[in-house]
Amino acid sequence: MQYTAKVVDVIKQRSQCLIVACYEGGALSPSASAISAADARNLEQLLKRENFQGKAGQTLLLLNTQGIAAERLLLVGLGPQMQDGSVTADNFRKAVEKSTEALKATPCSNLVICFGEVSVSGKDVAWQARQVAEALETASYRFDRFKSKPAEVSFVPEKIIFAVDKKQVNAANQGLHLGKSIATGVNLARELGNLPGNICTPTYLASEAKRLARGQTALSVKVLEEKQMKELGMGSLLSVSAGSDQPAKLIVLEYTGGAKKEAPIALVGKGITFDTGGISLKPGAGMDEMKFDMCGAASVLGTMQTLLELKLPINVVGVIAASENMPNGRATKPGDIVTSMSGQTIEILNTDAEGRLVLCDALTYTERFSPKAVIDVATLTGACVIALGGHASGLYSNREDLAEALLKAGEEAYDRAWQMPLWDDYQKQLDSNFADMANIGGREGGSITAACFLSRFAKNFPWAHLDIAGTAWESGGAKGATGRPVSLLVQYLVNSQAS
């Protein structure tokens, strides 16, 4: 899609659809007022006839509106205005989302969106433009590559004009670029997450990382094979791939947008491309969704895609621990003891707690980059889904300033996280009679004890863990990967430039 911020005459501007705002109680935005005046107030009569009240997200699509050059007019409610004339950010986002939904049945390919004139409490025009670009790009994503007859799609937007005044053009264009770039990364993460396990193997993830780096001077990729991992002592990671015919991969991406001496931020992704549970076999119902167990890895690749689009002047390392978790005669058994790259030994009491086993070696490996912060991203525990549902990712950290920065980024990106405790009280649940630790700590506080496990491998650097088991995908009729937390991670990286 092509996005442009420009000054337009809403009466004379030709487009297939002109989108203007109204407020709860009947107040019109400046553009809507201008259209009403050009239409001899017929617009206001239409709104009354259709009982359009301007509630947040309410839409009304009109064809052949008199007095304007646009073929269609879409009115979108923004909810009530506050005393200063602004609307809430939540209501603005809802209006953007619902306007996109309202157009899905139309053949519109070029739009003029008059939202730059709207005042949003605590936000600027760049933020508003970003919401529009993100919404349109993510709404246009479809996963139908394996259908013999893909669904026919009417709404395929190609050219979008975001209407602003002269002083807003530069800021709005920056917002449009940021929104489109983030959505590109989100959609890549969704695409990888939606792929079936027979296609998206560890080898496939490695090839996707190499594809991203092709022709890019700022991004390099190195893939460690099982032989190299064995030489490094990654017994924990390799214990997960032991039962699979697919070889594990440790995928290392280095984005160098900053000075050579600048310490990087590291993103570590769990890439279990299919999780049967291993010998601790999962129930059959819903097991198909275990193809989503690599969404942490997908979010790292999606974030790297956005970094390339934005060309941020920072250094970022991505480390992806990719493996299948399968049962066969070579598979790791409950009670087996393995030695991690850190030298710490682990009694594996449950082979379905495998994500932490690949991540702990990836965290130890990441230490060689002397990172100023490490964030691991993983669909780690069902316990986190029970605790937080699908609204917020679980956040754990050994540095409060890092946790606060991630929480702030999540709020700004509307890809929110919630901080959970990482108290020493929980560590004793990982005690083992036979090794340095067990890989599970019982039913109580399962997401917390999983984070406690990882914390034992992150003592030498600022570290945060995002448990995205509840946010990485949706089930039911809307089944599919969400692309979270790419937006959160990108916002954190954008914010880090000022720190």
Image (spheres, rainbow, N blue to C red):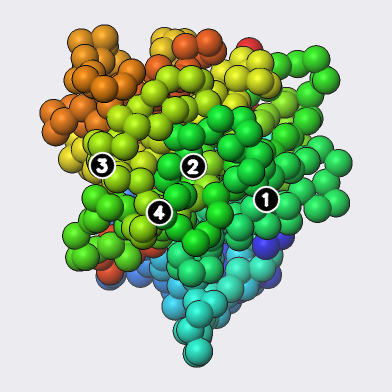
Q: What residue does disc 3 label?
A: 334
Residue 238 circle label: 2
Quadrant of the drawing holding the C terminus: top right
Q: Secondary structure at mark 3?
A: loop
**In front: mark 1 or mark 3?**
3
Q: Amino acid at mark 4?
A: Arg
Residue 330 circle label: 4
**In the image, residue 8 above or below residue 219:** below
Residue 290 at what x, y percent from top left? 35, 57
Q: Amino acid at mark 2?
A: Leu
The residue under the point 39% across, 40% down is 355
Q: Secondary structure at mark 4?
A: loop
Pointer 3 local density, CA inside 10 Å: few below 14, some 14–19, many at least 20: some
Look at the image and tell me whether residue 171 can be seen.
yes
Q: Earlier in the sequence, mark 2 or mark 4?
A: 2
CB contact under 8 Å: marks 3 and 4: no
**In the image, residue 316 above or below residue 458:** below
Residue 275 circle label: none
**In front: mark 2 or mark 4?**
4
What distance separates the C-alpha of mark 2 from that of mark 1? 21 Å
The residue under the point 25% across, 31% down is 440
What distance separates the C-alpha of mark 3 from that of mark 4? 13 Å
What distance separates the C-alpha of mark 2 from that of mark 4? 11 Å
Q: Earlier in the sequence, mark 1 or mark 3?
A: 1
Q: Amino acid at mark 3?
A: Pro
